Image (cartoon, helix red, strand yellow):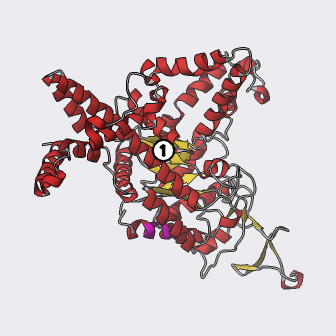
């Protein structure tokens, strides 16, 4: 017996036990509403999606072709449309496809201060609010899809089509939810470890099963692709990782996933010198990367910070900003150390923010990490901050140069030019871009590929194209040909925007509540019927 049938029977028993006062309650209507509201709380969602991520991580360990993907969201409607599209194009299957919540997009698009840079200046609560909003829209997608099946079921019953009734009932019983894991960006924790814990709790209660935290100084936080990044000593970062784990455990999400992000590759600065008690400990390893000069007691100046290493007095170079700088060329080694310590102290996945998408560079670091943590897995930002076309054309150029191929017809500094679009080099570069995720999953330990800001850019591009045509010579045809006609022919669900906004679900409920007296919006005069 399906849950749907069980709910009908359970409500029928409940109705009988409550006497004539409940006689107007239709048990099947209640069963439908329950089916359309599978997840009652954000914690229900967090537990459900955490199990999905853990299963996917195990599958990737067994087969690196089973990597996962996500696209960044800044609104619940955007997340909903992604999952509706995925179910439409992939036979109802959302396996290994998640959503990503980008702190950059929250800052740029969701702050009451207006557009902000990615520097943790937006409201703390806006992140949890967006998580809740994403899942509200995903749950509505479930309700809308099931509502359509229920209306089909009623129509099949009205025509006594028993075979169709059975088929639709099976679709109801095997319905796949649109609810998927969200990887949520908590930046550098928005304060100390206690602030991190409190914010993590709010995010988990909203539905987050996976929280990504970075090793930058919270009050100096910069976008991973900006200059001026400042990292914290390992012990400070590990305290925040533990704070997130405690938040998961307190709320009963025992399978919660933590992504530890290191910005050390592009961060040449630190605000603090780490505490160290003996040579070789974690603090000493962090300090060993500092750019220092040897000094004597006589050459010390007022206010100097001095380290004693192996009997030598070393003065870390301090900038006018009161920050200390690391030695040049140490970024990759610091990344490896960061990742090993994070994974050995509570993190589940690592994130290395790089300056370009280069599989060999990423793979070299992951291989070094796996010498100590064999099952290390990476989350990787397929960032719009990279010029993918130029980067990969240059990679092919450099490869061909090393192989002794004739590259005299190409100018490496001008490979972005449209003049190269139809060349063999451009075709090879595009093929490498196409297979980048599968190649990197296999060769560089990348379990999850995400694009942080895709819908920020698609919204800008589509709006620019529409404005150019609509306010130009095309007029209304700019909208009809460029938007609506494509929606109709591609089967985009929101062409029926009344339905997407819940009009039909509202009609269903009106009928449940008022029966034949219900005043419904979906009658013959509803212009949505044109679609």
Identity of the residue drawn at 35% across and 36% down:
507
Any magenta on residue 42? no
Q: Position of residue 388 (x, y in %)?
A: 65, 33
Q: Main secondary structure of the magenta part?
A: helix
The correct choice, above or below, for 283 with respect to 396 in the image is below
- Toward which corner of the image does residue 470 lie, by quadrant? top right
Identity of the residue drawn at 43% across and 61% down:
205
Q: Magenta segment range? A: 243-247
Let me know if residue 99 appears in the view. Answer: yes
- Total number of numbered discs in the rendering: 1
> Which residue is the extreme one toward the front?
517
In the foreground, 366 or 101: 101
Q: Position of residue 505 (x, y in %)?
A: 36, 38
The quadrant the N terminus occupies is: top left
Any magenta on residue 245? yes
Identity of the residue drawn at 79% across and 30% down:
413
The correct choice, above or below, for 120 with respect to 293 in the image is above
Identity of the residue drawn at 55% across and 56% down:
127
In the foreground, 166 or 442: 166
Let me know if residue 238 appears in the view. Answer: no
In the foreground, 76 or 201: 76
Mark 1, Cα crowd under 10 Å, few <14 / some 14-19 / many 20+, is many
Q: Position of residue 305 (x, y in %)?
A: 78, 79
Q: Is 356 positioned to the left or the right of 509 in the image?
A: right
Q: Is 417 positioned to the left or the right of 198 in the image?
A: right
The residue where tag 1 is placed is 99
The quadrant the C terminus occupies is: top left
- Toward which corner of the image does residue 257 lie, by quadrant? bottom left
Q: Position of residue 141 (x, y in %)?
A: 40, 39
**SS assignment at label 1:** strand
């Amino acid at each position: 017996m399906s849950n749907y049938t069980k709910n009908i029977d359970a409500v029928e028993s409940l109705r009988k036990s409550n006497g004539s006062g409940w006689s107007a309650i239709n048990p099947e209507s209640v069963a439908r509403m329950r089916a359309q509201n599978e997840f009652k709380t954000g914690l229900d969602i967090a537990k459900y999606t955490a199990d999905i991520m853990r299963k996917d991580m195990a599958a990737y360990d067994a087969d690196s072709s089973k990597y996962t993907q996500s696209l960044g969201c800044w609104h619940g409607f955007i997340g909903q449309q992604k999952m509706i599209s995925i179910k439409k194009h992939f036979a109802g299957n959302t396996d290994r496809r998640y959503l990503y919540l980008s702190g950059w997009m929250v800052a740029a698009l969701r702050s009451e201060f207006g557009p902000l840079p990615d520097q943790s200046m937006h409201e703390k609560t806006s992140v949890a609010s967006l998580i809740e909003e994403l899942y509200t829209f995903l749950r509505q997608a479930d309700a809308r899809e099931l509502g359509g099946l229920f209306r089909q079921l009623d129509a099949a019953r009205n025509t006594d089509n028993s075979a169709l009734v059975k088929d639709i009932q099976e679709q109801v019983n095997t319905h796949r939810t649109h609810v998927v894991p969200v990887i949520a960006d908590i930046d550098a924790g928005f304060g100390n470890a206690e602030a991190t814990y409190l914010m993590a709790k709010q995010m988990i209660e909203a539905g987050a099963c996976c929280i990504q935290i970075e090793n930058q100084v919270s009050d100096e936080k910069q976008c991973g692709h900006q200059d001026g990044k400042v990292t914290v000593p390992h012990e400070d970062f590990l305290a925040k990782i533990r704070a997130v784990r405690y938040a998961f455990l307190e709320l009963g999400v025992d399978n919660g996933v933590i992504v530890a992000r290191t910005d050390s590759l592009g961060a040449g600065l630190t605000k603090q010198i780490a505490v160290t008690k003996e040579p070789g400990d974690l603090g000493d390893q962090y300090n060993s990367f500092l750019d220092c000069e040897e000094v004597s007691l006589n050459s010390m100046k007022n206010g100097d910070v001095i380290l004693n290493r192996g009997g030598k007095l070393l003065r870390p170079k301090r900038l006018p900003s009161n920050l200390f700088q690391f030695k040049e060329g140490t970024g990759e080694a610091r990344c490896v150390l960061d990742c090993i310590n994070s994974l050995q102290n509570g993190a589940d996945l690592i994130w290395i923010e790089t300056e370009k998408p280069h599989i060999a560079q990423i793979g070299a670091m992951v291989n070094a990490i796996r010498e100590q943590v064999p099952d290390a897995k990476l989350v990787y930002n397929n960032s719009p901050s990279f010029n993918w076309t130029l980067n990969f054309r240059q990679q092919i150029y450099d490869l061909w140069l090393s192989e002794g191929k004739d590259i005299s017809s190409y100018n490496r500094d001008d490979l972005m030019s449209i003049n190269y679009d139809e060349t063999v080099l451009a075709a090879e570069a595009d093929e490498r871009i196409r297979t980048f995720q599968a190649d990197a999953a296999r060769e560089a330990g990348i379990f999850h590929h995400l694009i942080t800001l895709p819908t920020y850019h698609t919204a800008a591009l589509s709006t620019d194209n529409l404005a150019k045509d609509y306010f130009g010579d095309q007029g209304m045809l700019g909208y009809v040909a460029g938007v609506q006609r494509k929606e109709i022919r591609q089967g985009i669900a929101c062409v029926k925007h009344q339905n997407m906004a819940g009009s039909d679900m509202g009609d269903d409920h009106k009928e449940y509540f008022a029966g034949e007296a219900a005043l419904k919006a979906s009658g013959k005069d509803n212009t949505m019927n044109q679609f």
